Image (tube, rainbow, N blue to C red):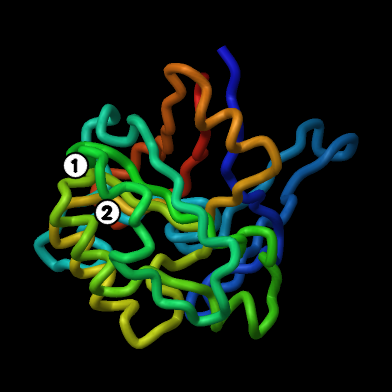
Amino acid sequence: MRIFDLSQPLFDGCPNCPVHPPVRLPRVADHPGDGWRMEEFHMASHTGTHLDAPLHKLALGGAIDAFPLEAFVGQAHVIELKNADSDYAIKGADFAPLYNIDLHGAIVLLNTGWGHKRAATEEYLYHSPYLSAEGAQWLVDRGVKGVGIDHFSIGGMSEENTQTHEILLGAALWVVEDLVFREGWRSAASAQGALFQALPLLLPGFSGSPCRAVFVY
């Protein structure tokens, strides 16, 4: 078995959604004085590579622990959008490579290249490509169970962000955000029997959770 990591690192002060609390991961004990090393987490649950549950946008939506773990594992189709401009709205037409594929129960991941731009810059934070409401509905209509993107928000910071989230989460999908497609992901994704998985922490009642997103092959 081999594992290919699609997760972004978490570190003190790492880039995150600018409306969320800054990420603080202080070391609160260390060798040799304390006899052990320990760190604390101070961050929103939607920080780093993470999953959104319906409760994130819908008051009566399911929490992250309402999904069985099997829901976060499956075959993934990656859509290449690395030439997308800033603020590009991803639409149904961008899913042309999937038109003849049965997507019911599948996972669709959007590779915009923005995972490699991850930094506290105006461009990365506010001008990423994003999944439009129309594109979100296209995926929902085809019965996918999960959608992912290589930015902290699948709707970016666009005016469609709320609507995109509501369409996806309202259909009881999960969303994985802040992925990064490192060199070699194509061979990992296309390997015979390869599966994508992104398992959340067991956080009862939470609207989302950090996760480790990987291809297993």
Q: Quadrant of residue 184?
A: top right
Rendered view: 61 above or below 185: below
Q: In the drawing, does residue 213 fall left or right of residue 187? A: left
Between the residue at mark 2 and the residue at mark 1, the CA separation in whole angstroms equals 9 Å
Q: In the drawing, does residue 194 fall left or right of residue 12? A: left
Q: Name the residue under label 1.
A: 66
Density class for disc 1 (Cα within 10 Å; few <14, some 14-19, many ≥20) is few
Residue 150 visible here? no
Q: Position of residue 174 (x, y in %)?
A: 28, 50
Label 1 element class: helix
Q: Which mark is residue 143?
A: none
Q: Which amino acid does label 1 sit on?
A: Ala
Label 2 element class: loop
Q: Position of residue 176 (x, y in %)?
A: 40, 51
Residue 155 visible here? yes
Q: Which amino acid does label 2 sit on?
A: Ala
Q: Are marks 2 and 1 in contact (CB under 8 Å)?
A: yes
Q: Position of residue 101 (x, y in %)?
A: 26, 40
Q: In the image shown, does 130 or 42 lie closer to the viewer? A: 130
Rendered view: 30 above or below 97: above
State the quadrant of the N terminus: top right
Q: In which quarter of the image is residue 11?
A: bottom right
Q: Earlier in the sequence, mark 2 or mark 1?
A: 2
In the rendered image, the residue lying farthest to the top is 1
Residue under the point 27% across and 27% down? 70
Q: Name the residue under label 2.
A: 53
Residue under the point 52% across and 51% down? 49
